[in-house]
Image: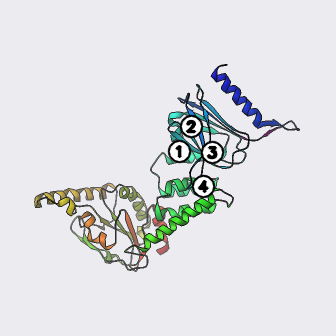
Amino acid sequence: MNMKFSHLMALVAISMTLFTCQSGGGVATSGTLIKGELTNAANLKAYLDRVGINSPNEVLANTPIDGSGNFVFGFVNELTPGIYQLRIGAQKAVITLDEGDHEVKIKGDVAEFGNYNFDISGSKDAKEMVTAMQGLRKEAVKVEDIDAIVKSVENPETGAFIAFNTLSRAGAVGIPVHMEALNRLPDSSPMKEKYTAFVRAMQSQIAQQQASETIRVGMPAPDISLPSPTGKQYALSDLKGQIVLLDFWASWCGPCRRENPNVVKVYEKYKKDGFTIYSVSLDGLDSRRTAGLNAQQIAQGQKGQKKRWVDAIAKDNLTWPYHVSELKKWESVAGRLYGVRGIPKTFLIDREGKIAAVGLRGAASIERALQDVL
């Protein structure tokens, strides 16, 4: 008996145990079949894991893939609704299963399996997860993208899984999305307890960090007066009466540059309502960079730093006028005054000149805080 025929007979045997006749002549289904047909996967092994939140994966089964790229997982008892991971070689993909998902079929190329470039049928929730994961791989993911997924997916466990895995290190900006995902989870979900503990721990950590901040919500914003690229002096206090986003950034800071489109988006939407931005750049040279350089070399270096700053303003379309810098990098007096130890770092200042919010990231997060003080 050849291997292909042997594998086929095993599949038939499993299928017969999962589909039984009813007295009325219909077919009663029980158990779960997950069947795969993947090109370039011949003679590899497929693994199936149960996936949770903030807990190790549970390996459920493994099965060989035949010479034609076919494999099957068969379970006499239906798999519990939840998140499952398929592993084939170095490729991994997660799917969501719900009650009544008795036969799930996957078809594609193993080389694209981890990118979710495969067809899946037999489970509405599995297809929803795959579609969401495909979208997340097409472009840079923003907090608002995850928020939209959490609110739109039918299966709340799909939303919770995606929120946890994409925003677990997002800090305060991710909390509203985590709360939305958590509130959608039913109490019966096995994810609920672990996710609740994770969110509470994150909230506690953020509260401790905020308590140690030099600048806190409700305090008057310390004044800053620094030169623009043209040499014009701009004082933060001159903007009192407007709502100001004080934004510490730098042209060399990748996360800052990726955040700039969000800042621009909010500025364009709310500038007519008295909202503006005061941008402090941490470009320039600090004493570590200038050690051993002569005055001419330092001047040349600062000239290059200033050009990079000005070019970034233009390239990122930062059209507000309040761009200032000491060109001293981490030795910026303004940065130290506000306790800035990492960038991007933002402070929302209300019309009375008081700190209204700290550490806003993402257009949705900035906009929510802004609407509270408009």
Sequence-first disc among 2 and 1: 2
Span colored in magenta: 27-33
The residue under label 3 is 126
The image quadrant that residue 249 belongs to is bottom left
Q: Secondary structure at mark 4?
A: helix
How packed is label 3: few (under 14 Cα within 10 Å), some, or many (20 or more)? many
Residue at image position (39%, 67%) is: 346
Kind of residue indicated by mark 2? Phe
Q: Label 4 belongs to which residue? A: 152
The quadrant of the rendering that contains the N terminus is top right
Q: Is residue 91 above or below residue 312?
A: above
Identify residue for label 2: 118
Q: Position of residue 91 (x, y in %)?
A: 51, 39
Q: Which label's residue is closer to the chain start, 1 or 4?
A: 1
Q: Amino acid at mark 1?
A: Gln
* Circle 4 residues within 10 Å: few <14, some 14–19, many ≥20: few
Asked if the magenta segment contains residue 82, the reply would be: no
Mark positioned earlier in the residue sequence (4 or 3): 3
Label 4 and label 3: CA atoms lie apart by 15 Å
- The reply to whether callout 1 and callout 4 are in contact (CB within 8 Å) is no
Disc 3 to disc 1, C-alpha distance: 12 Å
| Mark 3 residue type | Ala
Q: CA distance from mark 1 to mark 4?
A: 15 Å
